[in-house]
């Protein structure tokens, strides 16, 4: 068994395994299969979505639960999926549209202004410590946009040099009771780019799943790429 194919087993990633709660996720996978059968979600597994179908973001501030990457694959009942806001209204989505569709420089977008305000306050937004860091970040995003436009799709996590586990680190989505994706706390820029480019499909990391989606048979189709496995080098 090669470490290159299973990086979670490599000693250099053991600390990352703990931070990502991989042991707990493995136990969750076993419990999910025991309770819900072979159709239960796996932690960090990829789901394949029409990016334009992601219309809303999960909003814990409206009274819901705090749901993060560490809870990937968890089956959560209740009304948490009622807590949502329109994705298009998010400052990152809005600023991406301004930049890529209207040609507005990043420096003139509300997102850039917010990033600089947070830097001045001593925070580290998206890991940035200075104006130069922020500019570098958006130069990188422009390269991702250009590469995605040429390729016609987003890469899966398994196609990236930093590949760690399944789709961990990808666009994070929770699945509501009707089998619809809610954008969660990760990959917002990539999702905005996919929507702007009107990509036919994107890979995403599953977050939490409402049990009604399982009982209605709405989760299983999300596991299958409509483009076929040949579209993804190591999906």
Image (cartoon, rainbow, N blue to C red):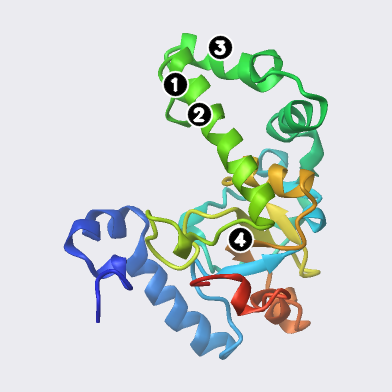
Closer to the camera: disc 2 or disc 4?
Answer: 2
| Contact, mark 2 vs mark 4 (Cβ under 8 Å) | no
Question: Mark 3 sits on what residue?
Answer: 117
Question: Mark 1 sits on what residue?
Answer: 133
Counting from the top left corner in percent of width and height, residue 92 is at 68, 32
Closer to the camera: disc 3 or disc 4?
Answer: 4
Q: Secondary structure at mark 2?
A: helix
| Contact, mark 2 vs mark 1 (Cβ under 8 Å) | yes
Mark 3 and mark 2 lie on one chain; the one further toward the N terminus is 3
User: Where 205 falls versus 98 (above or below)?
Assistant: below
Which residue is most to the top?
120
Q: Secondary structure at mark 1?
A: helix
Relative depth, front residue between 68 and 197:
197
Alpha-carbon neighbours of circle 2 within 10 Å: few (<14), some, or many (≥20)? some
Disc 2 from disc 4: Cα separation: 21 Å
Question: Mark 4 sits on what residue?
Answer: 204
Closer to the camera: disc 3 or disc 1?
Answer: 1
Q: Quadrant of residue 128?
A: top left
Counting from the top left corner in percent of width and height, residue 177 is at 77, 68
Question: Mark 2 sits on what residue?
Answer: 137
């Amino acid at each position: 068994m090669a470490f290159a194919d299973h990086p979670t087993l490599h000693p250099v990633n053991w600390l990352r395994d703990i931070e990502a709660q991989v042991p707990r996720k493995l136990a969750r996978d076993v419990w999910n299969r025991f309770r819900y059968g072979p159709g239960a979600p796996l932690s960090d597994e990829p789901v394949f979505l029409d990016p334009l179908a992601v219309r809303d973001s999960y909003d814990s501030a409206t009274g819901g639960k705090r749901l993060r990457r560490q809870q990937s694959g968890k089956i959560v009942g209740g009304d948490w999926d009622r807590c949502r806001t329109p994705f298009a209204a998010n400052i990152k989505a809005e600023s991406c549209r301004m930049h890529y569709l209207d040609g507005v420089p990043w420096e003139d977008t509300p997102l850039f202004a917010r990033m600089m305000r947070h830097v001045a306050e001593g925070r580290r937004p998206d890991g940035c410590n200075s104006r130069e860091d922020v500019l570098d970040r958006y130069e990188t995003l422009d390269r991702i946009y250009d590469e995605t436009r040429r390729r016609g799709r987003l890469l899966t996590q398994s196609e990236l040099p930093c590949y760690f586990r399944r789709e961990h680190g990808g666009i994070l989505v929770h699945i509501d009771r009707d089998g619809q994706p809610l954008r969660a706390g990760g990959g917002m820029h990539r999702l905005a780019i996919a929507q702007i480019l009107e990509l036919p499909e994107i890979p995403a990391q599953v977050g939490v799943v409402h049990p009604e989606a399982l009982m209605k048979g709405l989760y299983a189709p999300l596991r299958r790429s409509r483009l076929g496995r040949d579209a993804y080098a190591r999906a």
